[in-house]
C-alpha cells in the first residue's frame, strides 16, 4: 500500500481552520487567566509574610 487515503489529501476546510484558531485563542486566554490568578494568590501570601502575619501553605 503505497498511497494515502483520499481524505488525507483533502486537508482542512476554512471553517475547520477557524474553529481550530478559536480553540487556540480560548485556551491561551484561559491559561493567562489561571496564571494571573495564581500570581495574585502568591503575591498575597508574600505580602502577608512581609507584614509578619502567619502564612499557611495549602500543601
Image (tube, helix red, strand yellow):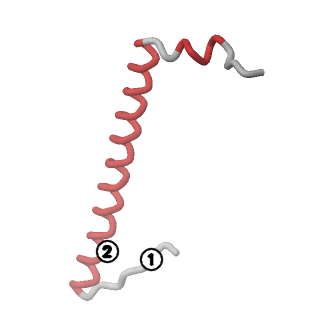
- Residue found at x 30% / y 63%: 39
Picture quadrant where residue 19 is located? top left
Dot 2 surroundings within 10 Å: few (below 14), some, or many (20 or more)? some
| Apparent side of residue 12 relative to residue 22 in the rendered image (left or right) | right
Can you say whether 58 is above or below 33 in the image?
below
Label 1–label 2 contact, CB within 8 A: yes
Which numbered marker is on residue 45? 2
Q: Place residue 56 in its image quadrant.
A: bottom left
Residue at far bottom of view: 52
| Secondary structure at numbered mark 1 | loop
Q: Nearer the viewer, residue 37 or 28?
A: 28
Mark 2 lies on a secondary structure that is helix
Cα gap from disc 1 to disc 2, whole angstroms: 9 Å
Residue 22 drawn at (x, y percent): 38, 27
Residue furthest right in the image = 1
- Where is residue 54? Give x, y as percent: 35, 85
At horizontal 73% and vertical 22% (from top left) the residue drawn is 2
Q: Residue at x 38, y 47 (%)?
A: 31
Residue 59 against residue 13 in the figure, above or below: below
Question: Within 10 Å of the Cα at label 1, are there few (<14), some (14-19), or many (20+) other Cα atoms?
Answer: few
* Residue 57, numbered label: 1
Residue 23 is situated, as x and y percent measured from the top left of the image, at 42, 30
**40 to the left or right of 26:** left
Amino acid at each position: 500500500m503505497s498511497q494515502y487515503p483520499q481524505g488525507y489529501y483533502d486537508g482542512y476546510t476554512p471553517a475547520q481552520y477557524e474553529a481550530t484558531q478559536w480553540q487556540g485563542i480560548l485556551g491561551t486566554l484561559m491559561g493567562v487567566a489561571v496564571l494571573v490568578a495564581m500570581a495574585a494568590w502568591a503575591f498575597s501570601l508574600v505580602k502577608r509574610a512581609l507584614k509578619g502575619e502567619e502564612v499557611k501553605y495549602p500543601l
